[in-house]
Image: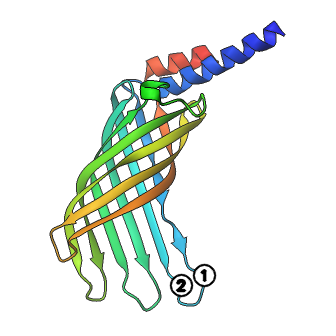
């Protein structure tokens, strides 16, 4: 019985150490989210598709900075097509377990806060208006590490464009699902190998 309890404690400690190894200074994060995919099946139904590739470098433990691209298409048969784009810088901060009362939902996952700032715009076909301007957003997310190098995530984000064209200010709440691949430095690889 003691051996079983000790094995369980070591497994939990190992999973926590593995999650911490991914978000250490010097590591890279690449991946993306899929937000709001919708394909109408009824007659005249349209489509709405949005992808968000991103990449970041950990400048300190738990803190990553990088860039993002957000591309979206929306339309329907015999209707104008709307193309949206955003590109810019992003920052991400991973919360430590127990930090400010935040508990880890699972021992091999981490809560994070993400913010972005860049330029973006909208273009509508068939004589529609277009708008370009400042794009910004922020929100919380959770990354669940299914392997030592891959995290599945959910992200709820306030996203806004302060347009300088005819579009004006637009905003929305998005929910994205995606994954990130964490590319560890030699120090991160050593921690992962020690856990195995």
What residue would you read off at disc 1? 41
The answer to whether residue 126 is above or below residue 37 is: below
Q: Farthest residue in the left direction?
A: 164
For disc 1, the neighbor class at 10 Å (few under 14, some 14 to 19, many from 20) is few
The answer to whether residue 121 is above or below residue 46 is: above
For disc 2, the neighbor class at 10 Å (few under 14, some 14 to 19, many from 20) is few
Q: Residue at x 49, y 76 (%)?
A: 47
Which x, y percent locates residue 88? 26, 51
Query: Looking at the image, which is closer to me, 87 or 62?
Result: 62
Q: Residue at x 42, y 75 (%)?
A: 74
What residue would you read off at disc 2? 45
- Left or right: 180, with 131 as reference point: right
Q: Residue at x 39, y 53 (%)?
A: 157
Q: Farthest residue in the top direction?
A: 2
Which x, y percent locates residue 31? 46, 46
- Left or right: 83, with 43 as reference point: left
Q: Are marks 1 and 2 in contact (CB under 8 Å)?
A: yes
Query: Looking at the image, which is closer to me, 152 or 159?
Result: 159
Which x, y percent locates residue 115? 32, 45
- Left or right: 98, with 85 as reference point: right
Badge 2 element:
loop
Query: Looking at the image, which is closer to me, 182 or 120?
Result: 120
Badge 1 element:
loop
Which x, y percent locates residue 175? 47, 56
Q: What quarter of the picture does the N terminus occupy?
A: top right
- Left or right: 87, with 139 as reference point: left
In three-dimensional space, the C-alpha distance between marks 1 and 2, rounded to whole angstroms, equals: 6 Å
Q: What quarter of the picture does the C terminus occupy?
A: top right
The answer to whether residue 171 is seen in the rendering is yes
The answer to whether residue 49 is above or below residue 94 is: below
Protein image colouring: rainbow
Q: Residue at x 67, y 14 (%)?
A: 10
């Amino acid at each position: 019985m003691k051996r079983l309890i000790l094995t369980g404690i070591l497994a939990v400690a190992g999973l926590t150490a593995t999650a911490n190894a991914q978000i250490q200074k010097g590591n890279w994060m690449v991946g993306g989210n899929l937000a709001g995919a919708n394909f109408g099946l009824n007659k005249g139904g349209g489509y709405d598709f949005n992808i968000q590739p991103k990449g970041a470098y950990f400048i300190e433990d738990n803190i990553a900075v990088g860039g993002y691209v957000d591309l979206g298409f929306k339309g329907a048969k015999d209707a104008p097509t709307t193309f949206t784009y955003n590109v810019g810088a992003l920052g991400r901060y991973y919360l430590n377990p127990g930090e400010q009362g935040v508990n880890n939902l699972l021992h091999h996952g981490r809560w994070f806060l993400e913010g972005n700032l860049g330029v973006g715009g909208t273009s509508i076909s068939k004589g529609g208006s277009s708008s370009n301007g400042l794009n910004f957003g922020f929100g919380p997310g959770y990354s669940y590490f299914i392997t030592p190098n891959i995290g599945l995530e959910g992200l709820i984000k306030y996203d806004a464009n302060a347009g300088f064209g005819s579009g004006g200010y637009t905003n929305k709440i998005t929910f994205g699902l995606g994954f990130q691949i964490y590319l560890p430095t030699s120090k991160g690889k050593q921690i992962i190998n020690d856990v195995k």
